[in-house]
Amino acid sequence: MFLREQQGLEWAGAGGAGAGGAGAAATRFPAAPAQHPLRERLRERVRVGATQTDWVPDLGRDIGSRTWWRGLATCTALCAGAWWLSPGWRPIVGAGAPAMTEAAFEEARTQSFAPLALGATTGRRMAAGALVRPLAETPERPQIELTAAIADGDTLPGALQRAGVGGREAARVAALVGGAAPRPGTVLSLTLGRRPTKYQPRPLEKLDFRAAFDLNMTVLRAGDGLTVVHRPIAIDRTPLHVRGIVGASLYRSARAAGVPARVVESYLKALGAHMPIERIAASDTFDIVADQQRAATGEVEVGALQYAGLDQGRRKVTLVRWGDRADDDGGEGGTLTDPGGQVERQGTMGMPVAGRVTSTFGMRMHPLLGFMRMHKGTDIGAPYGSPIYAAMDGVVQFAGRSGGYGNFVKLAHAGGLASGYGHMSRFAVGTGARVRRGQVIGYVGSTGISTGPHLHWEVWQNGRPVNPRAISMSSLQTLPAATIRAMKAKIARLVATPLR
């Protein structure tokens, strides 16, 4: 590194050279001054001192020392300089935009972006020229396409008239359609043509609607008249067949497998009429077959439950829809019946009233008498006035007041069975009347010896009290052998349906 001291030595060496080289040295190197001037030496010393001095020390350390006071002086000088150079507390007034005239504002607004609610426009509005003539009346569109829906309790002519079709033409359309009139909720697609004057209704040019699950209909104008075109829809009526493991929840497992909620509820209700639901285990296998229609247009319609099966390993439950209006091809009528003659009992989970069991069959401490006593039936707690249903077909043997039972109804059934319903608030049947299962026979109350509104339900088999929830229903009905064979054949055909 080249240093100042080395430079001075070189100059000194050059000055002490021989006489022969003195002239050349003088020519090549300028003569160095003998010593620095005093001013230069002071300036250099000040520069070095200022460089090595810490002017901004940490004021939190060595308080009161020379270094601390030097830092305080630096801070005070900087603050004073900032205060002296500040413009003051008066606001700095900037140049504002000049006020726009109304015409300039209108022109700028048309070229800006703003919500329509604030009056935004597009383009530049210009005044009408000499070629512009005001219209005497607004011209109408040659055709109007719109949709309408059939409301509950509405008719096809009423919906057409609300859409703008004339009364006579709406009546003509209804006459052409006849028995294929659309059901409530059907969407109508209309095309209305040009009308002679604005005081007359528009003529109907075209009407499209879904007349049935397997039929589309179109009404077209042909000259001055109307014609109907039927367009059938291909339907696949393969039943819905779902099988799966019960798991943690039978309802959730069936719904996850694609069974509609209404069908799952029917399935659970049918099982509950033949066995306690709590006996269904997570490892059991459910089997469900229901009517299903799949249209070529993609719509799917699931009908009644036709087969309900449950495989518990040692025991299998098989129920098939059979009876009135439920022929071998299926149908909405009939009941879910066991091939051995066990018929589905209508009610909530096989019980005659919707509620919860508050006391079961067997020995118990009587809530009012205060001692152990045989409880010959099942108590079901339910709100006051809840309807009570007959558990099975029968004849009203007694309907009236009966001691501690209060208002009491006794039904006689086939196979030596009888059932009783106590503590009713009022009756819905009289002695000698024939009732069908699921028919209302009375209403929940708290008459007789009772602590609150509930139903006391008893069942007798050959005159002996039995547990209503444990009684076998196989004795309710004995079907002919031919009917049983037909039912088993239907079950085999339903079970053979491909799984979903």
Image (spheres, grey):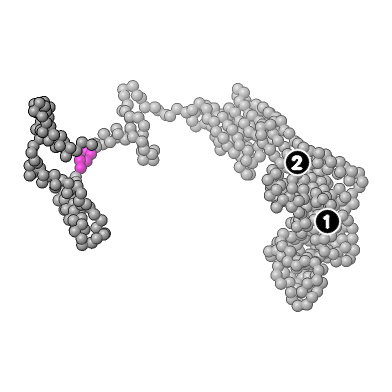
Left or right of 64? Residue 446 is right
**Nearer to us in this view, 490 or 453:** 490
Q: Is residue 1 above or below residue 420?
A: above
Residue 229 position in % (x across, y down): 67, 27
Q: Quadrant of the C terminus?
A: top right
Classify mark 1: residues with Cα within 10 Å, few (<14), some (14-19) or many (20+): some
Query: Which region shows up in magenta?
Result: 94-98
- Which label number is shown at residue 442? none
Residue 351 position in % (x across, y down): 76, 59
Secondary structure found at label 1? loop
Disc 2/disc 1 C-alpha distance (Å)? 31 Å
Q: Which residue is mark 1?
A: 393
Indicate yes or no whether the magenta region holds residue 96: yes
Q: Tag 2: residue type?
A: His
Left or right of 160? Residue 111 is left
Q: Is residue 147 above or below residue 52?
A: above
Left or right of 252? Residue 56 is left
